[in-house]
Amino acid sequence: MSAPDTDRVRLAELVASLSYAADLGLGQPMAHCMRQTVIALRLADLAGATDAEREATYYVGLMFNAFCHADATEQASWFGDDIGFKSDAFEMLGMTTAQTAAFVIRRVGGHGSGLSRVRRLAGFPQSSIKRVMDFLATHSRLAAQFAEQIGLDDVAVQAFRDGYEQWDGKGVPRGLRGTEIPLPARLVQFAGPVEVFERRHGRQATRSAVRRHRGVDFDPAVVDLFHAHEAEVLDDLDQASEWAELVDAEPYLSRWVCGPEPTPSSGRWPTWPT
């Protein structure tokens, strides 16, 4: 960032700093959300996204999981270590249906008194699945409300609201199907688990895993773009996560939160002396 701008803060940069809280809440190393955003933005370019869709992809990628710990107490009561559960849940990308069910059963029945375990397991799988869906619906609702409060446009707000929808229509909160789901939501939904799985297991395992979810969780066109441009999408993620340079390169991310001149967004945030 150039020297004259050091006394001002861009909304995009502030949101990037908030993404670190989401990293912690997901049990991931710092900059997970930044790396997933780079993946999603690269796919957005390949998909021919509009400027509004790219801006939405940026904010959804960084901020969508900021509320993943809003109901941490409820998550912990149901699944034990809530951060451990969210961290391990990324492994479901590579699991079969039977393995996924076993993973959830272990989490539901692996903590608390004997009686509490029996009670939780007695309602499995209906109660457990409903709990997960309720948690996800809460996260997307809060994220969409926050997006509205900081002045993001309708494309971004809708992408936050629909961030947990699935291509096959089995997501939440509205059961949208296919291209009813906004492109930024489809991109970030794909990029998040891919970032974690590739970092943990390598590219060959990631290719196999996402292929199994093609047309189920993930947009087939997004999966196909990923396979066709894997190196372009995944190479040098950390070097690409230079957020001042990224914001400087994207004019639609230039709005200021605070600084010498008031902006439409500045009234929504506390300001401080510069």
Image (spheres, rainbow, N blue to C red):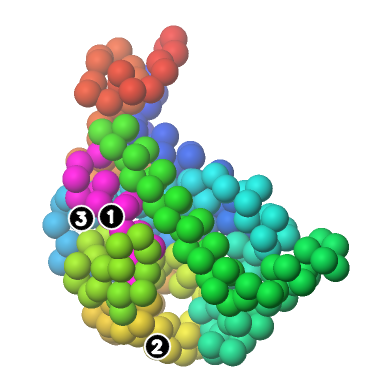
The image quadrant of residue 216 is bottom left
Residue 248 shows up from this direction: no
Q: Is residue 221 above or below residue 246?
A: below
| Tag of residue 167 | none
Tell me how far mark 3 sits from mark 2, CA to CA.
Answer: 25 Å
The amino acid pointed to by label 3 is: Glu
The amino acid pointed to by label 1 is: Ala
Question: Looking at this view, is 189 or 116 the one in front?
Answer: 116
Q: Is residue 65 above or below residue 167?
A: above
Residue indicated by mark 2: 211
SS for callout 1: helix
For the residue carrying disc 1, how many other residues have a C-alpha within 10 Å: few (<14), some (14-19), or many (20+)? Answer: many
For the residue carrying disc 2, how many other residues have a C-alpha within 10 Å: few (<14), some (14-19), or many (20+)? Answer: some
Tell me how far mark 1 sits from mark 3, CA to CA.
Answer: 9 Å
State the extent of the magenta-drawn residues as a range: 152-166
Q: Residue at x 45, y 51 (%)?
A: 139
Q: Residue at x 44, y 10 (%)?
A: 273
Q: Is residue 86 left or right of residue 121?
A: left
Q: Is residue 4 above or below residue 58?
A: above
Closer mark to the observer between disc 1 and disc 2: 1
| Tag of residue 53 | 3
SS for callout 2: helix
Residue indicated by mark 1: 159
How far across and how far down the image is residue 4, in percent? 32, 21
Mark 1 vs 3, N-terminal side: 3
The amino acid pointed to by label 2 is: Arg
For the residue carrying disc 3, how many other residues have a C-alpha within 10 Å: few (<14), some (14-19), or many (20+)? Answer: many
Closer mark to the observer between disc 1 and disc 3: 1
How far across and how far down the image is residue 29, in percent? 61, 56
The image quadrant of residue 83 is bottom right
